[in-house]
Image (cartoon, rainbow, N blue to C red):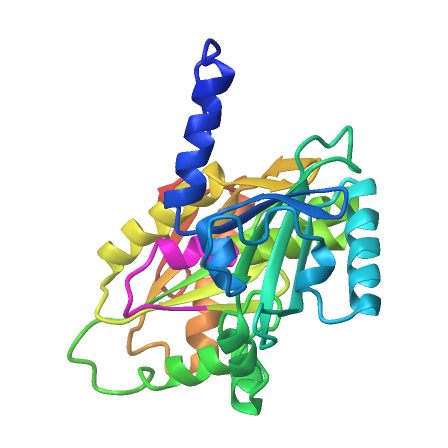
């Protein structure tokens, strides 16, 4: 949140109070093992409806046991001391004794003082977690990004390949430029966080009828039903620009990346799923060979069209 430099402490405090009351987020500030301030949504999540609720209460009051409380605080401290945010699913207990699973995202307010006050953001993921535990979900999804996996993408694509198409269908192949450099310099955990964020970004750039999957490593694909080559190019360019402007922030780590995209519209010469994906990947390879941060369109065997870069 950006504020003017001359905003006094009373104004800042009023803004913060308004945010805590009105924002539909479960947000809390934690210090010395206690809740210093929490939003209304945070209180409601734990079954507290009164004005004060969890303010002043120890963190132990929301953890399921003494052992869990100690272990969670140790993991929080270890993450902060190493310059990393804390992002984990934890089982919590409500005021009435019932339990739920929450995704806790926590960071210190000042990274040069990791043992000081921290910001907690909490989401109830009980239903999502139960869904992920089902064998059918696991078989169709990538566990890291929670997008569809390659097997499910190929199954969806096979419904269009070789059929008599009344509407055009296109596929995008996405490859992050120099992603191995991020993993090499910042570590696998930062890379995993980035891939999850990239998956969410891709979802924000497409229609509800489209289908996104992580194929492997830093390769993603998008299935675009009822989408011709021209519109697929527009979507590809929007994704390319979105990735280029995306900023990875993970604790003390800051970086940015770019991506190449290959575009292909299903055509009679591409008779199999492998042929379609191969054409999209080949177009993407052409984009990378041109220097990265660009889009290429597979027109026909051996033919490519440049869109951006």
In the image, residue 86 sits, relative to residue 242, either above or below, namely below
Residue 165: horizontal and vertical position, in percent? 20, 81
Residue 269 visible to an observer of this rendering: yes
* Coordinates of residue 167 in the picture (x, y in percent): 17, 75
Magenta part of the chain: 198-212
Q: Is residue 27 magenta?
A: no
Q: Residue furthest top?
A: 6
Numbered circles on residues, count: 0
Relative side of 66 to 210, left or right: right
| Percent x, y of residue 109 | 66, 34
Query: In the rendered image of this protein, does residue 73 appear above or below residue 274?
Result: above
Which image quarter is the C terminus in? top left
The one nearer the camera, 292 or 34, is 34
Which residue is located at x 84 percent, y 60 percent?
70
Q: Is residue 245 left or right of residue 58?
A: left
- Residue 201 located within the stretch drawn in magenta: yes
Tell me the quarter of the picture where residue 275 sits.
bottom left
Q: In the picture, residue 68 is in which quadrant? A: bottom right
The residue positioned 59% from the left and 62% from the top of the image is 103
Q: Image check: 195 left or right of 51?
A: right
Query: Is 62 or 7 nearer to us in this picture?
Result: 62
Q: Can residue 149 be seen in this view?
A: no
Percent position of residue 45, x then y: 50, 62
> At 31% from the left edge and 72% from the top edge, which residue is drawn?
266
Position above or below: 130 against 213: below
Which one is in front, 22 or 259?
Answer: 22
Residue visible at 26% across and 60% down in the picture? 229
Query: Which residue of the protein is positioned furthest toward the bottom in this rendering?
Result: 135
């Amino acid at each position: 949140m950006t504020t003017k430099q001359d905003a006094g402490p009373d104004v800042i405090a009023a803004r913060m109070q308004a945010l805590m009351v009105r924002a539909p987020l479960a947000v809390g500030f934690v210090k010395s093992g206690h809740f210093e301030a929490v939003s209304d949504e945070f209180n409601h999540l734990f079954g507290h409806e009164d004005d004060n609720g969890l303010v002043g209460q120890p963190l132990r009051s929301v953890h399921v046991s003494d052992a869990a409380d100690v272990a969670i605080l140790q993991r929080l401290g270890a993450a902060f001391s190493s310059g990393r945010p804390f992002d984990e699913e934890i089982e919590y207990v409500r005021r009435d004794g019932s339990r739920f699973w929450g995704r806790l995202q926590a960071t210190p307010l000042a990274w040069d003082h990791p043992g000081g006050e921290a910001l907690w953001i909490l989401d109830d993921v009980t239903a999502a977690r139960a869904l992920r535990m089902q064998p059918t979900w696991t078989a169709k999804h990538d566990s890291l990004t929670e997008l569809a996996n390659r097997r499910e993408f190929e199954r969806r694509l096979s419904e269009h390949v070789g059929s008599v198409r009344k509407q055009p269908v296109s596929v995008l192949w996405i490859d992050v430029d120099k992603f191995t450099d991020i993993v090499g310099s910042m570590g696998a955990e930062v890379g995993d966080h980035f891939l999850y964020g990239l998956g969410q970004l891709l979802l924000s750039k497409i229609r509800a009828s489209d289908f996104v999957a992580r194929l492997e490593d830093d390769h993603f694909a998008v299935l675009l039903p009822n989408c011709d080559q021209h519109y697929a190019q527009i979507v590809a360019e929007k994704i390319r620009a979105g990735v280029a402007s995306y900023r990875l922030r993970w604790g003390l780590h800051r970086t940015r990346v770019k991506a190449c995209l290959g575009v292909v519209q299903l055509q009679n010469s591409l008779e199999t799923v492998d042929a379609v994906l191969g054409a999209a990947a080949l177009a993407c390879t052409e984009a990378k060979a041109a220097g990265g941060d660009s889009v290429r369109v597979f027109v026909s065997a051996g033919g490519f069209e440049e869109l951006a870069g």
